[in-house]
Image (spheres, grey):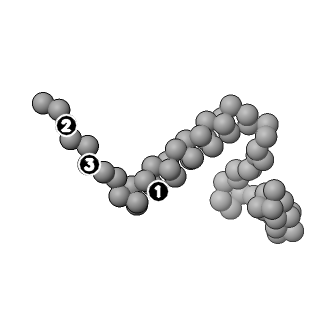
Amino acid sequence: MRLRRLPLSAYDELRLQFLRETERTLAYALAHPEEFPRIPAVEVGKGRFSRAFAEQFWADVLTS
């Protein structure tokens, strides 16, 4: 028995496009980690970064 494919709605098409783009971006990032900023992970309550450092870090990351 052959399954009948139903046409995709505009929402489904957009959803698939987002998934494909995300998949390509993650695959590229894993293959080329040197091209992406490293986001330091610090346990909550244990960090010693100053507020100014954190603000500058995120400003740099979000504008690049």
Q: Is residue 63 above or below residue 13?
A: below
Q: Residues within 10 Å of mark 3 (few under 14, many from 20)?
A: few
Q: According to the image, label 1 marks what residue?
A: 14
Which SS class for mark 3? loop
Q: Are marks 1 and 3 in contact (CB under 8 Å)?
A: no
Residue 61 placed where, x, y %?
79, 57
Residue at 59% over, 40% down: 24
Q: Are marks 2 and 3 in contact (CB under 8 Å)?
A: no
**Type of the residue with mark 1:** Leu
Residue situated in front as seen by the camera: 2 or 38: 2
Drawn side of residue 50 relative to residue 15, left or right: right
For marks 2 and 1 on the same chain, the one whose residue lies earlier in the sequence: 2
Q: Quadrant of residue 36?
A: top right
Drawn side of residue 15 relative to residue 6, left or right: right
Residue 57 placed where, x, y %?
82, 59
Q: According to the image, label 2 marks what residue?
A: 3
**Type of the residue with mark 2:** Leu
Residue at 66% over, 54% down: 43
Q: CA distance from mark 2 to mark 1?
A: 23 Å
Residue 29 placed where, x, y %?
68, 39
Q: According to the image, label 3 marks what residue?
A: 6
Residue at 34% over, 52% down: 8
Q: CA distance from mark 1 to mark 3?
A: 16 Å
